[in-house]
Image: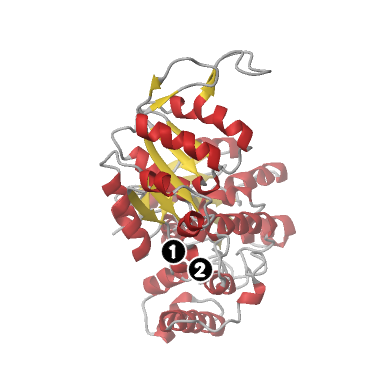
């Protein structure tokens, strides 16, 4: 059911009072504006809105060009109104084609244009980011709905209730620091510092001073006192990332701190009591490291009281597509044009690829594709995964999804993008077809050519 009140941004030099009344009768709050600057002021951050761009109301070419930055706003679904023959202008035609869900030619039917704007608004609403409620598949900055991630979210909530040390294991790029932050923010220490230190990124001869600090004059160049990371985390959480790379000499000092809960700065003469919770993480096989003598077993057992295993991306199924869409929504402002989602071949490649770099690699590939893409949808080639498109689906569920995508695509092609006719052939409702287009990443599908009969609204697939 649609909300009782929806915002419409009506851009016009000569707004129609009759059309304004129709929108009000259908539950819209109409805001009439006359310039690109006023459009930007009218858009409410984070809220979906419908947009009607009345290009027939004699805007100057430089004013129309200024509207392009407004049309890229991610939370407004635009429909254009044009004069007959106006779309012969190449720049105007590109503006409508690339940024508007639909267009009408004057004179137009009031009900038809209200329906068209309502559809644009509905599709924008479908694309809004999901709520970050932990029970529904999110934990702070972490996103996921597969069984492995839901189990991880439950573990985070459980271990956050205690002060015991937590050990997070998992491959590089899986988001171990995000898990540590989520634990801290759900704990009683949430208002105290969260202090991370990458044990593998600091040279061994500097690690002692980074961990425990030093006094002025402790060594050449020590011109003033420095508080170490352990002391800086007092009252809060110390996150020891890549603990498996910690040098043996530093392992002894860390073990002594864990036993005594006191630190002594280099060059200092007294112990300082520190109250911190320790969270550690590594991609190293700790069992092998202990057998080979690279890591002290007594330190490991001090650190690994509660253990959490971070799932690799390749084991997260549909989460791969969910994460890709989340990253597209987050970074799509970097694109030179409005992107409508992922092409079917990109979705196939996302699932077929093994993701050795895990979530970090996925983020990098999507961000690069957003910048480099030249089309309305991101393709497998944009992701640099074109060779993974043709791999046969590895599960029955993937095979069914691929067949469904193909059936929808062929039906739309046969009916020149007319959703009503395609839905009838497929034996589903028009609304269901809209939802399937969204879930399968097919919102890029082009509709009928822009040249519609005079005065009619083209029955087309929206330029999503």
Which quadrant is home to the N terminus? bottom left
Could you say whether the residue bearing mark 1 is in a helix, strand or loop? helix
Asked whether disc 1 touches disc 2, contact meaning CB atoms under 8 Å apart, the reply is: no
Taking the image as shown, residue 178 lies to the left or right of residue 266, namely: left
Q: Check disc 2 and report the residue beneath it.
A: 441
> Marks 1/2: CA distance?
14 Å
Which element type, helix, strand or loop, lies under badge 2? loop
Sort mark 1 into few (<14), some (14-19) or many (20+) by Cα contacts within 10 Å: many
Determine which of the numbered discs, if any, sits on residue 427 in the image.
none
Q: Which mark is residue 319?
A: 1
Image vertical order of residue 276 relative to residue 140, above or below: above
Which callout, 1 or 2, points at the residue further toward the start of the chain? 1
Numbered marks: total: 2
Using the image, determine if residue 247 lies above or below residue 210. below
- Model colouring: secondary structure
> In this rendering, does residue 219 appear at all?
yes
Where is residue 199 shown, x and y percent of the image? 54, 41
Image coords of residue 452 (percent x, y) = 59, 70
Tell me what residue is drawn at x 61 percent, y 37 percent. 204
């Amino acid at each position: 059911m649609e909300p009782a009140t929806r915002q419409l941004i009506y851009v016009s030099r000569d707004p129609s009072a009759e059309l304004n009344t129709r929108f009000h009768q259908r539950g819209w709050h109409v805001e009439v504006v006359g310039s690109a600057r006023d459009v930007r002021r009218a858009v409410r951050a984070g809220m979906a809105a419908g947009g009607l761009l009345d290009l027939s109301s004699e805007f100057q070419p430089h004013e129309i060009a200024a509207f392009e930055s407004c049309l890229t706003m991610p939370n407004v679904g635009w429909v254009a109104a044009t004069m007959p023959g106006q779309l012969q202008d190449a720049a105007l035609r590109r503006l409508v084609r690339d940024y508007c869900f639909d267009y009408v030619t004057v004179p137009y039917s009031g009900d038809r244009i209200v329906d068209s704007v309502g559809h644009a608004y509905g599709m924008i609403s479908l694309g809004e980011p999901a709520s970050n409620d932990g029970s529904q598949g999110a934990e702070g900055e972490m996103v996921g709905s597969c069984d492995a991630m839901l189990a991880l979210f439950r573990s985070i909530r459980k271990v956050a209730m205690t002060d015991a040390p937590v050990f997070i294991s998992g491959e590089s790029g899986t988001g171990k620091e995000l898990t540590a932050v989520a634990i801290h923010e759900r704990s009683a220490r949430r208002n105290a510092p969260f202090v991370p230190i990458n044990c593998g990124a600091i040279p061994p001869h500097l690690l002692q001073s980074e961990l425990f600090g030093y006094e002025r004059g402790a060594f050449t160049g020590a011109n003033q006192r420095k508080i170490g990371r352990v002391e800086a985390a007092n009252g809060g959480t110390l996150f020891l990332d890549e603990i498996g790379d910690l040098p043996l000499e530093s392992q002894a000092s860390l073990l002594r701190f864990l036993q005594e809960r006191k630190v002594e700065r280099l060059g200092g003469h007294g112990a300082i009591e520190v109250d911190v919770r320790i969270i550690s993480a590594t991609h190293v096989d700790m069992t092998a490291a202990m057998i080979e003598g690279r890591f002290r077993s007594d330190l490991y057992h001090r650190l690994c009281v509660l253990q959490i295993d971070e799932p690799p991306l390749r084991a997260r199924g549909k989460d791969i597509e969910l994460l890709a869409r989340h990253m597209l929504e987050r970074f799509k402002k970097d694109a030179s044009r409005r992107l409508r989602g992922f092409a079917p071949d990109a979705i196939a490649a996302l699932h077929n690829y093994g993701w050795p770099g895990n979530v970090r690699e996925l983020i990098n590939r999507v961000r690069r594709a957003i910048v480099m893409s030249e089309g309305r949808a991101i393709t497998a080639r944009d992701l640099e995964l074109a060779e993974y498109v043709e791999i046969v689906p590895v599960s029955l569920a993937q095979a069914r999804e691929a067949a469904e995508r193909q059936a929808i695509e062929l039906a739309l092609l046969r009916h020149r993008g007319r959703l009503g006719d395609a839905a009838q052939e497929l034996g589903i409702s028009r609304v269901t077809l809209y939802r399937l287009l969204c879930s399968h990443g097919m919102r890029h599908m082009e509709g009928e050519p822009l040249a519609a009969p005079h005065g009619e609204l083209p029955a087309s697939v929206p330029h999503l």
